[in-house]
Image (cartoon, rainbow, N blue to C red):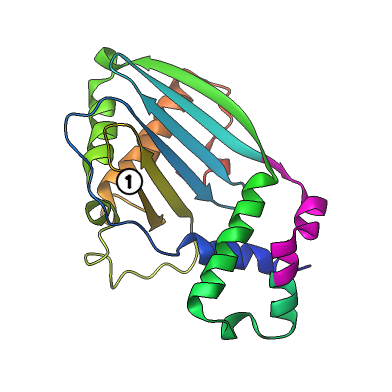
Amino acid sequence: MFIIDKYQYFFCVAFLLGSATVYGQANTTHYTIEVKANTPARYRIEVTRNKKVVQLRYGRLDSVRLTRMSADPDVKAMQALDAAGKLFTLPEAERDALFQRVLAADERNSVYTWDSLQIASASHRALVQLFDSVSTSSAAQLERKEANRNRIILDGTIFSITVQGKQVTPKKVYAHSPDRTSHPLLSRLIRESLELYRKECPNALLDTRHTGGY
């Protein structure tokens, strides 16, 4: 079925489309970082930074409303184009816009189970400094496209990371299976956020079975 099989492929393709190469600003203490992971058991990490505390939320995909997804006009349009062999003959901008609308439909119809954790900034200085570094680094510094231009990943996890805040320039970056060599800051962001959660919450929603090994 397209929704279960081919749709997953198109989701991965669209997940990699474009990224904003903008720069953050220094000395910011109010921002949010949202990590979205596309694995068979999709999950999220959300970091909300304030001056004295950091709120972390962890979400695991519970279900997708497939009936509603199947009825979505953009999903039906993509199905029809694919069945006719015309999807990849569309102009690139038109095809990319369609992929983004299908992603939005997926987001509207995805149901997550959430857990949360609050930490004091003064008690977790190294981790908070890591969050600050991600918020102030440029998209180019986070994605490291030139350093990774010969890197080939056949499978793995595709991540989307969004940074927003009143005192930061918004940015959205993408990484395919980031590790300590390919994407040092993003790899640490994901791994150390999850390690803290598992340490503080023994019954954590997100163990390594649900996070692609992270």
- Screen quadrant of the C terminus: top left
Query: Could you classify mark 1 by the number of other residues whose Cα lies within 10 Å: few (under 14), some (14-19), or many (20 or more)?
Result: many
Magenta range is 62-77
Q: Is residue 3 visible?
A: no
Left or right: residue 122 versus residue 67 is left
Which residue appears farthest toward the left when viewing the image?
26
Q: Is residue 189 above or below residue 20?
A: above
Classify residue 199 by image quadrant: top left
Secondary structure under badge 1? helix
In the rendered image, which residue does mark 1 sit on? 186
Query: Which residue is found at the position 54% from the left and 66% from the top?
Result: 97
Q: Is residue 82 above or below residue 146?
A: below
Image x and y of residue 86, in percent: 65, 85
Q: Is residue 57 above or below residue 138?
A: above
Q: Is residue 76 magenta?
A: yes
**Nearest the eye: 75 or 150:** 75
Classify residue 69 by image quadrant: bottom right
Query: Which residue is found at the position 28% from the left and 57% from the top?
Result: 21
**Nearest the eye: 214 or 16:** 16
- Screen quadrant of the N terminus: bottom right
Query: Which residue is found at the position 26% from the left and 25% from the top?
Result: 29
Identity of the amino acid at label 1? Leu
Left or right: residue 184 versus residue 193 is left
Left or right: residue 99 versus residue 1 is left
Query: Which residue is found at the position 37% from the left and 59% from the top?
Result: 19
Numbered circles on residues, count: 1
Secondary structure character of the magenta stretch overall: helix
Left or right: residue 64 versus residue 48 is right
Q: Is residue 206 magenta?
A: no
Image x and y of residue 139, in percent: 27, 52
Classify residue 75 by image quadrant: bottom right
Q: Is residue 48 visible?
A: yes
